[in-house]
Amino acid sequence: MNDDNIGISRRQTLLGLGAVGVASAGAGFGTTAYFSDEEAFEDNTLTAGELDLFVHVDYAEDQGSYNQYEIDTVLNGNTVGEDTEGDPLKIEVDDVKPGDSGEGVLCFSIVDNPAYMWLCGQLTENSQNDTTEPEAEALNDMYGEIPEEGQLAEAMQVTLRYCTEDDGELVEGDLIAEGSLADVMAALDNGVPLDGSGDGAAGIDRDPFDGVESSEEHDETCVCLSWEVPTEVGNEIQTDSVTFDVSFYAEQARHNDGTMNPCITSREVEGFGKLDYEDADVLWISKARNGGSNTFELLVGDDNANSDTADYDFGGSSFDGELTVAYDADSGEATLELANGSTGDVSYAVSDAAGDVVSIVARGDDASHLASVSNVRVNGSSPTGPDAVEADGAEINSLLVEDVDASVDWELTADVALEGLDDDSAASDENPAVYVEVIDA
């Protein structure tokens, strides 16, 4: 490190959101007479409960003699029936340098029903901004050029853990996510289900958080966030800035299973989903289709011409089984698997995976065809929105799963039904078929 000034800013937004729908109901009780006796239940009242999420934030940062910053506050989320977002907390950190750090404890008051919790995050800005002379020299040494995006998101190291408080002392628990800020936000972009007991391996089959009587109390399971810019980082981060959002969502546990993911949304459109976006690029594809002359195949690749293929025996005029499409970020390999007792699968190392939409296309195109996709899950959770799409007869319809970070590990599963597999009328037109397309929209 030399003594050139480093001027960097970073902003974090924490939102407490209670996302829940409740229908109120009233009941009338009549009287029942037995001979000359009369018994009645009068003035009966059913009152809808509430679910309100409060996030207790205790945050501090250490920038040496430049700044010592602390926050102790409570964020109010949504109360049932109110159409408002939670109060945002914005933490702005200026003049970040190697060696600076910060840490926060986030605890939850869910009034008054137990609830499943989700954690969502997104890197919204990673700017290079102006470039100083020492920064330009460092960047050219590292990359041979000056990249368009900044380096602070990769340089800043972040850890998210479960934690508890014991007699005023903080006790660290299981890991939720760690790595660079860019890595952690990519993991949170697809949603992280939080476990009420603090089990880092629980996944989607987790415990809800307990309800409390007031916002003065909070659940014993909290989330601890820490960040630092290591001292090994050099001039490449000068003038850079990053912005990211973190949101918490609560959904009442009663009559819910906690699998609906508020971080990922979905909608159904007619035709090919890619056409619903202007100037969208299809980065890679996977298809279960008729390859011509009623020879069905499984296909994965950057396009139809540059792919691995495999013959697949559907076993008759119809098929009913499970579709799995997965991406492994470490290997860069995408896999398509179709199974109904026997398994057919293919894989391919795709060249570009940084998409933000997964389009599931059901293609019929003939009156005798049916292509049905249902029970769509991303990493075991259902998107907020429809989870099925169907092309019955001469149709093409698509389910768009949006707000997805397709550059990290992910897996999509769905139930698939196909009919009209033995129809010769469209043997060269890929019908019936199901496509999964990864789109940069």
Image (cartoon, rainbow, N blue to C red):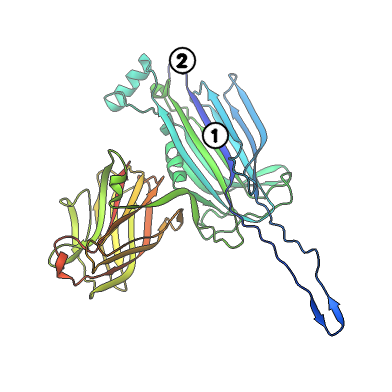
Q: Amino acid at mark 1?
A: Thr
Q: Amino acid at mark 2?
A: Asn
Q: Image height check: is 65 above or below 336?
A: above
**Residue at (53%, 32%) from the top-left corner?**
12
For the residue carrying disc 2, how many other residues have a C-alpha within 10 Å: few (<14), some (14-19), or many (20+)?
few
Q: Is residue 162 left or right of residue 30?
A: left
Label 1 SS:
strand
Q: Image height check: is 142 above or below 6?
A: below
Query: Seen from this angle, which residue lies furthest left?
Result: 293
Q: How many marks?
A: 2
User: Dividing the image into 4 quarters, which one contains the N terminus?
Assistant: top left
Label 2 SS:
loop
Q: Is residue 406 left or right of residue 120?
A: left
**Residue at (45%, 29%) from the top-left corner?**
242
**Residue at (52%, 29%) from the top-left corner?**
11
Q: Quadrant of residue 387?
A: bottom left
Q: Disc 1 or disc 2, which is closer to the eye?
A: 1
Label 1 belongs to which residue?
A: 13
Q: CA distance from mark 1 to mark 2?
A: 27 Å
Q: Are marks 1 and 2 in contact (CB under 8 Å)?
A: no
Sequence-wise first label, 1 or 2:
2
In this orientation, which residue lies closer to the viewer: 293 or 233?
A: 293
Residue 80: give x, y in percent of width and height.
64, 49
User: Looking at the rendered structure, which numbered label has been put on residue 287?
Assistant: none
In this orientation, which residue lies closer to the viewer: 165 or 81?
A: 81
Residue 252: give x, y in percent of width and height.
61, 56
In this orientation, which residue lies closer to the viewer: 64 or 43?
A: 43
Query: Seen from this angle, which residue lies furthest front?
Result: 36
Q: Is residue 342 left or right of residue 201?
A: left
Q: Quadrant of residue 382?
A: bottom left
Residue 361: give x, y in percent of width and height.
30, 56
Label 2 belongs to which residue?
A: 5
